[in-house]
Structures are given as C-alpha cells and as structure tokens.
Amino acid sequence: MEMFIDGEWRAATSGRSFDILDKSTGVVIDAVPRGSLEDAQIALIAASDAFPAWSRSDPSERSALLRGIASGLRASLSDFASIISAEVGRPMAGCTREVERCADLLDYFADEGDRLFEAWRTSDSESAFVLRQPVGVVVAITPFNMPLTLMIMKVGAALVAGCTVVGKPAEDSPLSTLKLADLAKEAGLPRGVLNVVTGFGAEIGQALVSNPIPAKIAFTGGTAAGRAIAREAVGQMKRLTLELGGQSPAIVCEDADLATAAKAVVRHGFANSGQLCYRVARVLVHEAVADKFTAQMVAETRKLIVGSAHDPQSDLGPVVGERILLAAERHVADARRKGARLLFGGKRLTGGAYDAGCYFAPTILADCTPDMLVMQEEAFSPVIGVQIVTSDEEALEIANGTAFGLAAFVFTADRERAMRLVRDLDAGSVWINDIQRSRHDMPFGGFKMSGLGREKSAHGIEAYLELKTVYFPQ
Ligand code: NAD
C-alpha cells in the first residue's frame, strides 16, 4: 500500500519501501513506503491547509462523518480483522473484537462530541464565556500491538474536536491504519483532514515531531521514545498526550476468590502474547494462599494453545519480532540467576510451524524479588513474575516501587480493603476482583513514567481543544 496524503495515495519521495510480514508465517504480505523528512513535510502541509475549513465546520457534521467511518468498519469487519491478525500475529477472534470496539469507539466520540459541544454552547454566562477551539494539526504516532484501536483513540477524538491529523503507525503493523484512511476517504472526509505516512520512527517520526507545524503530538509507545518526543515537543510548547509503558501489578489477598483471580491474571497477563501495555506483569500474592494460587495460575496457563494466528485453535500467536524474544529471555535468565523458580514455560517455542515466526511459551516465575528485571522493567512479552507478600503495606510498597503507573489489579473479598488499596496505588486505572475491557467513556492513561494526560472519555476529546475565555462589559 502507499501513503495517504492530501486525499491521494503516494509513494515515498525517495522511492524506497519496506516489507510487512505476516508474523505467523514470515511471508511478505505487502510493502509500504519508507517515508522521510520530505514526506513528513508534505503531509503536514496538507493537514495545515485543511485545518481552517475543518476546524470551522459544524461539530455535528464532523460527528456524522465519524459515524460513517464506523459503519464502514462494521461493513468490512473481517477484512480489517484479517489484516490485523496477519500484521500483528494475533488470533482472529481477538482482532474481530478489536475492530468491533473500534467502530463503537468512533460512535462514542461522535455522540460525546455532539453532547459536549451542545453542553458548552449553553453553559456560557452573559458577561463571560469560554470558547473551545481545536488545537491545530495533530501528529498521532502509534505502536504495533493494537494498531487500529490506538490510532482511532487519537484520530476519533482529534477529528471530532476539529483538528486535522497526520498519523504514523508502527513499522511492524501499518496496514490497518492505511486501510482506515481508505475508509475515511470513502466516507467523505475532506482531503488533508486525515493523512497517514509510513516509515521508521527514528526517521519520519522524529521529522513529524520536530516540525513546527503540528500543535499537538499524541503518542502511544515505549517510555524511551515517549521521553525523546516529550523533550522535543516541550521545547516548542506543543501540546502532548503520552501513553507509555507499564509494569502493572496484581495484588491477590488471602481472602480473594482465587479461582476467579487466577483466570483473570492468566488471561490478561498473557493477552496478545504479553504485548499489551496494561497487562498483569507482576503478581503480589499473600503468603497464606501463595502455593494454592500459583498452582491455579499454572493450571490455567497449561490450557493455553500457542500457535499460528491463522489457526482457530490458537489462544496466543507469535510475538512481533526477535526483540521481544530477546527481552523475554533476558528477564527469565535474570530472574533465575537471582533465585526465581520457573513454574511454567521460560523458553522460545521452536520446531515445525513455530520456526516461521517468533513464539515464546507463556511463562510464570515464582519467588521473585523486586530487584529482578521481571518485577521492574517492561519486557512486553508473555512473562509474569510472582512475589510473596505478608501484608497489604508490603504489597503496596512493592506495587508502587517501579517507575511505572499505568494500571493495577486488586483481588479481595473485602470492599473496604480494596478501596484502601485503590487509594494508595500509583495507577491510572485499577480493576477490582476481575479484569474486564476498559470502557470508552472512562479515561485511560498513566501515572509517573507511564504517560501524560488521558485518552478516551470526555477528557480524551478535551485534550484536543484550547480554552479561550472571552469577557463582555458587565
Ligand atoms: P515504540 O516506542 O518502539 O514505537 C512506538 C511508535 O513510535 C512507532 O510508530 C515508532 O515508529 C515510533 N517512534 C519510535 N521512536 C520514535 C521517535 N524518536 N520519534 C518519533 N516516533 C518514534 O513502541 P512499540 O515497540 O511499537 O510498542 C510497545 C510499547 O508501547 C510498550 O512500551 C507499550 O507499553 C507501549 N504501549 C502503551 C500503551 C498505553 O496506552 N499506555 C498502549 C500500547 C502500547
């Protein structure tokens, strides 16, 4: 596929491209342009030219266009799901749910946009009022793991607010975002309002961020890239939303429903083969139930089938590349050297169909301690570390003892105890006694090094608006 700039499909000005692989089979499924500084500039100018008309359009027209894109997504659900399944390596069932939820998210932004603009219009006083104006051109940069969702979280909110966008999907999985641009064109989005460029982060990503045109950078990805982007953006006072890494803890108290907790921790900790920002990465379990709980975790993990994303039997597919395998191996080796016990997995899966992709067995390490990498650093892989704790205070100290603060999970039968833990946890979202999907009408984002600002919900739309206070004579 080519890049989508100013309503047209284009190759890179350099003429260069790179291959996109099916992560389960290693087969090349497409090639996309390797965009660079010139392409970033062309796309940003297109977005800047489109901004005046789009920003002044009636919010209800913008919402109607988003609903059009949502219905286009529903009409081509299986096409989108197949693309994501191949480019990321996730089994189809999860990808189908991702596309359905993306359509719902666009509808949510459309409805919420209508509601917010109406509420703001009627809340002004006689002598002063607040105008909400779109910030300007937005650069939206996304990671590989949930390619459509994370782009739509930005694009949906930005478009409904009246901003124009240049999107830059990850180099591993750009195809679903390019296809989204195609849908937007079909739905009637004016040219230049949504542009999608492709290339490697360090080249075109940096070129987009350092360019003076965008007023806002919305970024989801690793904390290292997020810090580099923040430094550049703050120097130009660009608005920023950063959704970064996580190392999220689950606290399992001695009074918890252990069967439910084990199922939830295993399902969520290994979801998308561990390539999920707010997955359970660490378990802090009370000593009284530690053996029983880890046995239940192992029993749940044993049920998981790891295989090609194209096999309907597979629960977990491959990871996206060698770098994730290396990170997982590093964490396992470090933990074992420091005294952890390997309860399950711990290695690459090889032989037969496994040799066509990068597969890692879901892995549980027990007797972990806070000095182990698995308890501190994000590996973005299917490895969970389990540590025994003797009190809630100790659990909290360890839970909060990393640089991250994206999510946390609490399992206890005592609601007051749960609320005390919730109050003291450094986390942007906390789930109690089960782990269901995050809601579109609730904010999502992190404390500490897990990010800045929130996406989704009304807060997610406000992040694309400037406030202008206007006074009349009294
Ligand atoms: P990554 O940071 O390597 O890349 C993310 C995106 O940034 C890619 O599009 C990449 O090309 C681009 N990029 C990289 N360096 C850049 C730079 N200097 N300037 C501009 N763009 C640059 O992340 P990844 O490996 O694709 O994804 C995994 C990471 O994403 C994990 O850390 C995970 O926790 C995080 N993530 C966070 C959330 C969240 O909501 N907090 C959601 C999903 C993933």
Image: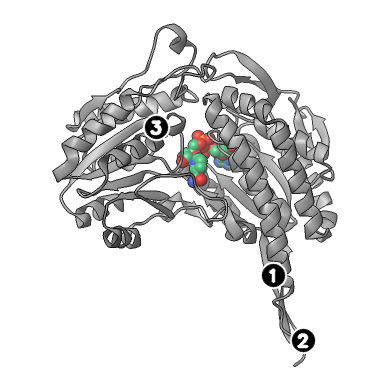
Give me the residue at 67% from left, 70% from top. 467
User: Circle 1 — which element?
Assistant: helix
Ranked by sequence position, the earlier of labels 2 and 1 is: 1
Question: In the image, what residue type sits under mark 1?
Answer: Ala
Above or below 166: residue 94: above
At x 51%, y 19%, the residue is: 312
> Residue 270 got which mark?
3
Between 471 and 267, the residue placed more toward the observer is 267
Q: Report which residue position mark 1 lands on.
A: 119
Q: How is the image coloured?
A: one colour
Q: CA distance from mark 1 to mark 3?
A: 42 Å
| Residue lying farthest to the bottom in this orientation | 474
Estimate how packed mark 2 is, as few (under 14), some (14 to 19) or many (20 or more) residues with alpha carbons within 10 Å. few
* Mark 3 / mark 2, whichever is N-terminal: 3
* Mark 2 Cβ inside 8 Å of ligand 1: no
Task: Tell me which amino acid carries mark 2.
Answer: Phe
Residue contact at pointers 3 and 2, CB within 8 angstroms: no
Question: Which residue occupies the extreme top position in the image?
Answer: 352
Position of 261 with respect to 45 (left or right) is left
Place of residue 54 in the rendered image (x, y in percent of width and height, measured from the top left): 81, 54
Residue under label 2, please give it.
472
Q: Place residue 468 in its image quadrant.
A: bottom right
Identity of the residue drawn at 78% across and 48% down = 65
Three-letter code, disc 3: Phe
Q: Nearer the viewer, residue 433 or 175?
A: 433
Q: Residue at x 69, y 56 (%)?
A: 111
The answer to whether one can see residue 201 in this image is no
Circles 2 and 1 in contact, beta carbons < 8 Å:
no
In the displayed structure, would residue 164 be above or below residue 469?
above
- Please indicate whether residue 454 sits to the left or right of residue 409 in the image: right
